[in-house]
Image: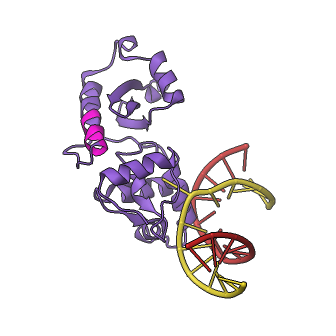
Chain colours: A purple, B red, C yellow
Amino acid sequence: MYFMKNQCAELPIPTPDGQFVARYSENGLTELDFPSAGSARRADRTSQRDVPAVSNQIRGWHHTTESALKKILAGNEPTQFPPLDLNGTEFQKNVWNALRRIRLGTTRSYGEIAKQIGKPRAVRAVGGACGANPVPVLVPCHRVLAANKKLGGFSGGLAWKRALLTREGVSLQ
DNA sequence: AGGCTCATGACTC
DNA sequence: GAGTCATGAGCCT
């Protein structure tokens, strides 16, 4: 049935930084939430024991997601990523793909990303697409800084951006 | 250094 | 269409 298309599993990921929440479609990881009041509420509502019918495939993806997330939180490059099923416009997907090529411990500016996707003047739009990134940390939107090498913004809160970059060994201005 | 203005593209309503 | 930006460059003081 058509409504099955968007069905997802929602699974918590406990970490030393709090409980993240991952959501999956039949094609892969669709969303990752930082620990927060909102995600905590959702996680309480749909904890693992309330989802009896999670497929083995999704369990496998979730294991990969969990280990990749914990590695990045510890400042290490993950060995493997789960398949991603990102919903967005073509422009946003282009930006997110560019973000995935930024190696851990390195940064780009919004302008550099704009150039890289062939739209050198779409710098503000790149910022917007970063803010719309549904899978923070694994799609490293935190590695995008403003042109002056200053922090810029972060939808998950600037404290998170600072912490992630610090753990990756990036020094800010 | 800090502040202001303006061009700018994508997105939302 | 107008308003909103996780920008950037230019131009002041």
Residue A20 to residue A99: above or below: above
Quadrant hosting residue A9: top left
Residue A8 to residue C11: above or below: above
Q: Which residue is at the far left?
A: A79
Residue A125 magenta: no
Residue at (57%, 63%) from the top-left corner? A124
**Quick one: A72 or A112, which is closer to the camera?**
A72
- Would you say the magenta stretch is mainly helix, strand or loop? helix
Q: Is residue A8 visible?
A: yes
Per the rendered image, the range of residues in magenta is: A66-73
Return the x and y of residue A5 as percentages of the image width and height.
44, 29
Quadrant hosting residue A101: bottom left
Return the x and y of residue A119 as percentages of the image width and height.
49, 70
Residue at (24%, 22%) from the top-left corner? A56
Count all numbered tags in the image, as a single digit.
0
Return the x and y of residue B9 as percentages of the image width and height.
58, 66
**Quick one: A126 or A14, which is closer to the camera?**
A14
Residue A70 magenta: yes
Residue at (53%, 55%) from the top-left corner? A153
Quarter occupied by the C terminus of chain A: bottom left
Residue at (28%, 56%) from the top-left corner? A104
**Quick one: A136 or B7, which is closer to the camera?**
A136
Q: Can residue A82 be seen in this view?
A: no
Q: With B6 as the anchor, is A109 left or right in this view?
A: left
Q: With A116 as the anchor, is B11 left or right in this view?
A: right
Return the x and y of residue A29 as percentages of the image width and height.
36, 36
